């Protein structure tokens, strides 16, 4: 394929290795494909506990299941409010609705898209029993600030780490600051087995309830044998665990590669005047699942479209927006919650309007990042963004128009 500026097509991701084949073959050879006939799932949970210094890991079938396991373990009174950001995957809100709880959306920081702690504090009421902090794009949310406002009120905190496997917040792994941390192993994640999830807990009682929730509430041994609580079948299969156990040791090199690619991209974008170079929130080491390419201010929709089309034309997997609509504007969510007159999350809307999402993977090289920067820089130059960047607001591009 002939591409503009004579570059190569973008490589697709290839994750398979010999270790996966061996582990899967072992399961198949013994006909042991389930949690209870194979030791693969329990061994994955132990691998996870050792790797991330957590006391209890419970594997499940998806990141959504992992969130449900976390909420199920908390066993909040029906009608409690659960606060969450509106820029996240649908799974984050679905489990709240499935539990009969009321989602309350808080606004996002317009620079990072992460839950705004200021907006969170303003939304807390005596009905608030839980906050779900999402580490969006692999950038850790400010957990200390979130815990500072939630702990004194006895509000539980779940960290949705689906996009942030291995990310660090002030030297701690994400998922270890709140009451529970949840992960996804869906096919686009840093390590994956097609579909899968995992929940971590520090409190052993919560962990026990989480394990029961993931297994139909069934206490399978001991004096209390029997169905002892609510639950569903979210058990991970041995085949999923076999693939993940082989891939988990590769996570450090995958993370290092993602971080190096983002560092290269940030350097190459320096001073372009159109896109803000990606940077880690203070005190964090993101996993950079997706790289947000944020315009420095709202630009006309046609220029936003030109930018994403130009990047796509060189093969870069860029979406013009991470979400077409934030969760609180999605039809089903509106139907459940009713339409409110005042917009509760204006800064989340601005973030989505301003931000393109670039997918990266460990098979890319710095040359791909320089290609992305090259495209951005050419468009910035063509539209004279370099010239206007110190001149305050450039009215040609400061208006986004009506949607
Ligand atoms: C932030 C976030 N939460 C939850 C999920 C749900 O994970 P899964 O698709 O594995 O159910 C995802 C999936 O991408 C996600 O990005």
Image (tube, grey):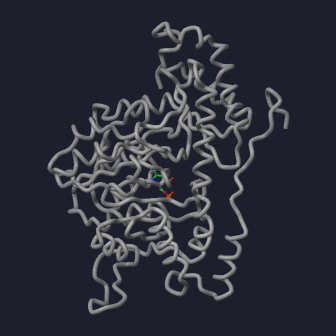
> Does residue 32 appear to the left or right of 48 in the view shown?
right
User: Which residue is at 68% across, 59% downward?
Assistant: 15
> Does residue 71 appear to the left or right of 288 in the view shown?
left
> Does residue 284 appear to the left or right of 205 in the view shown?
right
Q: Residue furthest left?
A: 126
> Does residue 147 appear to the left or right of 272 in the view shown?
left
Residue 223, quarter of the rendered image: bottom left
Q: Position of residue 390 (x, y in %)?
A: 50, 9
User: Which residue is at 58% across, 71% downward?
Assistant: 240
Q: Is residue 171 above or below residue 222?
A: above
Q: Residue furthest front?
A: 171
Q: Residue furthest right?
A: 2
- Nearer the observer, 57 or 113: 57
- Nearer the observer, 202 or 339: 202
Q: Position of residue 329 (x, y in %)?
A: 40, 40
Question: Split into 4 quadrants, where in the image is the N terminus?
Answer: top right
Q: Is residue 234 above or below residue 316?
A: below
Q: Position of residue 120 (x, y in %)?
A: 27, 40
Q: Position of residue 213 (x, y in %)?
A: 35, 73
Q: Is residue 20 above or below residue 284?
A: below
Tally the numbered discs: 0
Residue 73, quarter of the rendered image: bottom left
């Amino acid at each position: 394929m002939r591409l503009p500026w004579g570059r190569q097509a973008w490589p697709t991701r290839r994750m398979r290795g010999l270790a996966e084949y061996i582990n899967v073959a072992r399961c198949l050879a013994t006909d042991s494909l389930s949690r209870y006939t194979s030791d693969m799932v329990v061994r994955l949970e132990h691998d996870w506990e050792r790797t991330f210094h957590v006391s209890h890991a419970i594997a499940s079938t998806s990141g959504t299941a992992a969130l449900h396991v976390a909420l199920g373990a908390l066993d909040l009174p029906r009608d409690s409010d659960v606060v969450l950001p509106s820029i996240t995957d649908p799974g984050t809100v679905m489990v709240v609705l499935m539990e009969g709880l009321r989602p309350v959306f808080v606004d996002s920081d317009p620079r990072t898209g992460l839950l705004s702690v200021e907006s969170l504090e303003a939304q807390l009421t005596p009905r608030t029993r839980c906050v779900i902090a999402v580490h969006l794009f692999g950038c850790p949310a400010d957990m200390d600030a979130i815990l500072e406002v939630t702990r004194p009120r006895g509000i539980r905190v779940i960290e949705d780490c689906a996009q942030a496997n291995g990310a660090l917040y002030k030297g701690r792994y994400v998922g270890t600051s709140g009451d529970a941390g949840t992960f996804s192993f869906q096919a686009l994640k840093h390590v994956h087995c097609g579909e899968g999830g995992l929940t971590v807990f520090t409190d052993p009682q919560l962990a026990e309830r989480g394990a029961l929730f993931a297994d139909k509430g069934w206490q399978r041994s001991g004096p209390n044998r029997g169905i002892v609580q609510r639950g569903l079948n979210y058990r991970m299969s041995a085949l999923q665990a076999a693939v993940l156990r082989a891939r988990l040791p590769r996570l450090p090199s995958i993370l290092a590669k993602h971080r190096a690619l983002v560092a290269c991209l940030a350097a190459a974008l320096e001073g372009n005047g159109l896109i803000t170079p990606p940077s880690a929130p203070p005190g964090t080491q993101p996993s950079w699942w997706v790289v947000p390419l944020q315009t420095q201010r709202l630009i006309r929709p046609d220029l936003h479209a030109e930018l994403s089309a130009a990047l796509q034309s060189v093969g870069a997997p860029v979406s013009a927006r991470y979400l077409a609509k934030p969760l609180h504007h999605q039809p089903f969510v509106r139907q459940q919650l009713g339409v409110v007159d005042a917009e509760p999350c204006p800064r989340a809307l601005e973030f989505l309007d301003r931000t393109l999402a670039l997918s990266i993977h460990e098979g890319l090289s710095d040359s791909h990042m320089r290609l992305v920067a090259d495209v951005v820089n050419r468009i910035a130059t063509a539209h004279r963004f370099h010239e206007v960047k110190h001149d305050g607001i450039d009215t040609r591009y400061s208006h986004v128009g009506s949607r």
